[in-house]
């Protein structure tokens, strides 16, 4: 027997063969049929059937002998067997079966006399493909034969019988699938049907689900759930792992490393899958992923979609050991749903925006959620839901500043009694977090050292003479040692960066920090995201309603606070007008009025910036801006930059002119006295007025009323001889405060005299030279 197999590129061509003297065996076979080719379609449904059921394939290949008995020559027979291991069910089966597609094309072109198959189910398991083949065969005059009978699709009875055979084949498939699905669901309802286990679980020899015995794997999974419970965001958990250099375990699916445990860099998708997988809560869940689409044979199937946990077919709680409680798992899912901004009813995760009530503020008129609307002039909470949906006017809008300030004050007033407990809880949380990180690092180091030790043992077992193997094993050992050294270096850097345990002094500092909640709340290092997370611990929602005043006019805003405990409280706060944002806040003006009595404008700007106060536009303060605000609001300064009629400023400085008038000298004298270091002066910059810092004692030194302090009064020449210093060095000593200079009236002129300070006098006394002797040497 000689048969040919149709290759993908070989065309189907008709080959005329002489009829046997006896004529065709079946009366339905005409000489025209015998002049065409024979196509034998061989298919088994799955790779398992191909490997374990060779007898079915042998019977299908034997149809070539039946074709010869029907009257065709061996060279006319073509076997199509490239669809082995492919199902014939479903509307997509024909598109996935290249061999069947070419068979249908050959039938439609009239190049085939007869199509042979072991049974109808080999050709198609769905009515759509089967009836399409029957119609093409009837149109082209092609016969269809199985192991027993030859059918002519042009004959009504044969077409009816073929249709029934196709329907029975489809019904048979349905019954087989129903029995299999029923048996599967029976095991599923008992929780015995094996499902894929996520990382962190393994299956024992008796089929029970257990924790992964690798402590590093368990620690990583528990760290993810612990950090999410603390931080409340999957992205925050990802940042925590990345900041501390931690990795997460992943199970390899497919490839040569199928089922192997790998350690990889954390990703958001991996952490989100762990947080949303109910298996970690000890639940057996089946049916969350199902395929959507049309009925079999009526269209392509849809993709596999994930349904909500409530829509799963089977949910068995407490099925196996759990990493977290079921209630905690549901809470985590709710938090993830709230964090996602694609769900309109959700609160949303706390973001970095300036609106403190983002996600939890609602309109007191229509009940819709109010959204923050940021603008440079006036950020507001705006209720524009009905405008976006129905084109109605905006319900109401309220400026953010006055609402957030009132809610913050109410929050801080309520949280004060719990400050001590919060401090202790924060300290314990720090300890728990540091212990968790340290544990993960120790497990990573232990695993790396074990792998290096294992590589060393493999190298020791290798024969030294077998260098081909020894070199490879030695290279692997060196790679493991380098990995250990690199991991230890990363661990040292992590410890230097803050992995060390929290000391008692640090715990005391944390208690003081949390104990003063207003200071921590207003601290510049506290982010808006952290403030929002703190606020949501006590406040669940806020409802705002403004009075019926005109738009932009001042009035009263009613704030209803819904606390986590279920209680509600009401606040009524003053609502500024729309033009108030263009004016400097009254607290800032009051602060400037107070500071202007003791500080100049440049110092006022430094103090305001240090206190976190800004201008009405949110800019930092400069001396020019302070001067402009003072001039606009008529705030006088006690520390003018330019000399005025007043002799003394609020910070104790006096003008050169006022000091010169009091001492009876020319103003230019102070220029030399400043150079010599005899008086203290301040000047903002080159060309700015010179200001003097003079006390009553300084005036006594300068007007000649001050006397000697017990040591001789030196002239400049006497000081040079006594100390062996130059004039410039004496001036430098005076500027450093080692000498006290004063003016004295001698005869008809004034002279400068020097007197040592107490420290300098003690130094001279130790030298053994009395002050009177120093004077006599002049």
Image (tube, rainbow, N blue to C red):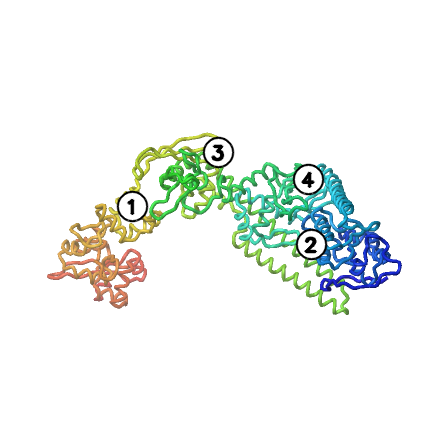
CA separation in Å, label 4 and label 1: 64 Å
Q: Foreground: 62 or 319?
A: 62
Q: Secondary structure at mark 2?
A: helix
Q: Residue furthest right?
A: 22
Instruction: Compare marks 4 and 2 and give the one earlier in the sequence.
Output: 2
Q: Secondary structure at mark 3?
A: loop
Instruction: Compare marks 1 and 3 and give the one earlier in the sequence.
Output: 3
Instruction: Compare marks 1 and 2 and give the one earlier in the sequence.
Output: 2
CA separation in Å, label 3 and label 4: 33 Å
**Which mark is drawn over residue 256?**
none
Tell whether label 3 touches label 1 (CB within 8 Å): no
Q: Percent x, y for residue 643? A: 18, 54
Residue marked by disc 1:
582
Q: Nearer the viewer, mark 2 or mark 3?
A: 2
CA separation in Å, label 1 and label 3: 37 Å
Q: Foreground: 264 or 456?
A: 264
Q: Percent x, y for residue 208? A: 73, 42
Instruction: Compare marks 4 and 1 and give the one earlier in the sequence.
Output: 4
Instruction: Compare marks 2 and 3 and give the one earlier in the sequence.
Output: 2
**Which mark is drawn over residue 564?**
3
Q: Nearer the viewer, mark 1 or mark 3?
A: 1
Number of residues whose C-alpha sits closer than 10 Å to that of mark 3, classed few (under 14), some (14–19) or many (20 or more): few
Residue marked by disc 2:
96
CA separation in Å, label 2 and label 3: 57 Å
Number of residues whose C-alpha sits closer than 10 Å to that of mark 1, classed few (under 14), some (14–19) or many (20 or more): few
Q: Nearer the viewer, mark 4 or mark 2?
A: 2
Residue marked by disc 4:
320
Instruction: Compare marks 3 and 4 and give the one earlier in the sequence.
Output: 4
Q: Nearer the viewer, mark 4 or mark 1?
A: 1
CA separation in Å, label 4 and label 2: 40 Å
């Amino acid at each position: 027997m000689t048969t040919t197999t149709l290759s993908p590129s070989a065309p189907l061509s008709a080959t005329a063969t002489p009829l046997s003297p006896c004529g065709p065996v079946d009366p339905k076979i005409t000489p025209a049929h015998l002049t065409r080719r024979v196509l034998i379609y061989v298919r088994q449904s799955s790779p398992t059937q191909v490997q374990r059921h060779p007898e079915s394939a042998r019977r299908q290949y034997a149809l070539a002998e039946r074709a010869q008995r029907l009257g065709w020559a061996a060279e006319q027979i073509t076997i199509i067997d490239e669809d082995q291991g492919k199902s014939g069910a479903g509307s997509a089966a024909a598109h996935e079966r290249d061999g069947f597609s070419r068979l249908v094309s050959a039938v439609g072109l009239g190049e085939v006399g007869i199509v042979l198959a072991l049974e109808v189910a080999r050709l198609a398991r769905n009515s759509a493909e089967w009836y399409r083949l029957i119609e093409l065969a009837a149109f082209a005059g092609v016969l269809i034969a199985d192991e027993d009978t030859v059918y002519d699709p042009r004959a009504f009875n044969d077409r009816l019988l073929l249709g029934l055979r196709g329907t029975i084949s489809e019904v048979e498939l349905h019954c087989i699938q129903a029995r299999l699905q029923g048996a599967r669901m029976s095991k599923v309802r008992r929780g015995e049907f094996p499902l894929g286990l996520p990382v962190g679980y393994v299956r024992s020899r008796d089929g029970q689900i257990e924790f992964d015995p690798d402590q590093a794997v368990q620690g990583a999974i528990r760290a993810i759930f612990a950090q999410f419970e603390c931080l409340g965001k999957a992205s925050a958990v990802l940042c925590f792992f990345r900041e501390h250099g931690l990795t997460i375990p992943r199970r390899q699916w497919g490839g040569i490393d199928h089922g192997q445990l790998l350690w990889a860099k954390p990703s958001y998708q991996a952490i989100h899958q762990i947080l949303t997988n109910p298996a970690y809560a000890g639940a057996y869940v089946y049916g969350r992923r199902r395929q959507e689409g049309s009925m079999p044979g009526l269209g392509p199937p849809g993709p596999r979609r994930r349904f909500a946990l409530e829509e799963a077919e089977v949910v068995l709680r407490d099925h196996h050991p759990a990493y977290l409680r079921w209630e905690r798992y549901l809470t985590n899912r709710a938090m993830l749903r709230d964090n996602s901004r694609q769900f309109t009813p959700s609160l949303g995760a706390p973001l970095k925006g300036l609106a403190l009530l983002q996600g939890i503020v609602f309109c007191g008129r229509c009940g819709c959620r109010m959204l923050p609307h940021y603008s440079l002039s006036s950020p507001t909470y705006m209720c524009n839901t009905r405008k976006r949906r129905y084109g109605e006017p905006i319900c109401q809008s309220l400026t953010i500043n006055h609402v957030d300030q009132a809610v913050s004050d109410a929050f801080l007033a309520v949280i004060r009694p719990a400050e001590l407990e919060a401090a202790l809880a924060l300290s314990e949380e720090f300890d728990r977090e540091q212990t968790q990180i340290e544990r993960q690092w120790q497990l990573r180091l232990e695993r790396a050292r074990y792998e290096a030790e294992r590589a060393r043992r493999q190298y020791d077992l290798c024969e030294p003479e077998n260098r081909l193997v020894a070199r490879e094993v030695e290279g692997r050992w060196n790679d493991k040692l380098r990995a250990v050294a690199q991991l230890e270096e990363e661990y040292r850097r992590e410890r230097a960066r803050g992995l060390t345990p929290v000391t008692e002094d640090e715990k005391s500092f944390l208690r003081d920090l949390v104990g003063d909640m207003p200071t921590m709340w207003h601290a510049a290092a506290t982010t808006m995201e952290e403030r929002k997370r703190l606020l949501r611990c006590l406040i669940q929602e806020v409802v705002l309603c403004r009075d019926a005043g005109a738009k932009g006019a001042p009035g009263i805003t009613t704030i209803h606070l819904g606390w986590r405990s279920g209680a509600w409280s009401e606040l009524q706060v003053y609502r500024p007008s729309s033009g108030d944002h263009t004016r400097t806040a009254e607290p800032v003006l009051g602060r400037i009025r107070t500071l202007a009595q003791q500080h100049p404008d440049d110092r006022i700007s430094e103090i305001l910036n240090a206190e976190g106060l800004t201008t009405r536009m949110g800019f930092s303060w400069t001396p020019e801006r302070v001067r402009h605000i003072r001039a606009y609001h008529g705030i006088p300064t006690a520390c003018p930059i330019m000399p005025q009629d007043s002799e003394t400023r609020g910070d104790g400085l006096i003008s050169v002119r006022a000091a010169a008038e009091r001492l009876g000298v020319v103003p230019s004298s102070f220029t030399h006295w400043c150079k010599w270091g005899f008086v203290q002066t301040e000047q903002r910059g080159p060309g700015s007025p010179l200001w003097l810092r003079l006390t009553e004692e300084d005036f006594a030194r300068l007007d000649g009323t001050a006397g000697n302090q017990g040591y001789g009064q030196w002239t400049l020449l006497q000081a040079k001889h006594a100390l062996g210093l130059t004039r410039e060095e004496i001036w430098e000593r005076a500027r450093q405060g080692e000498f006290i200079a004063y003016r004295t009236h001698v005869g008809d002129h004034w002279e400068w005299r020097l007197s040592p300070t107490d420290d300098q006098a003690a130094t001279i006394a130790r030298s053994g030279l009395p002050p009177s002797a120093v004077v006599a040497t002049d």
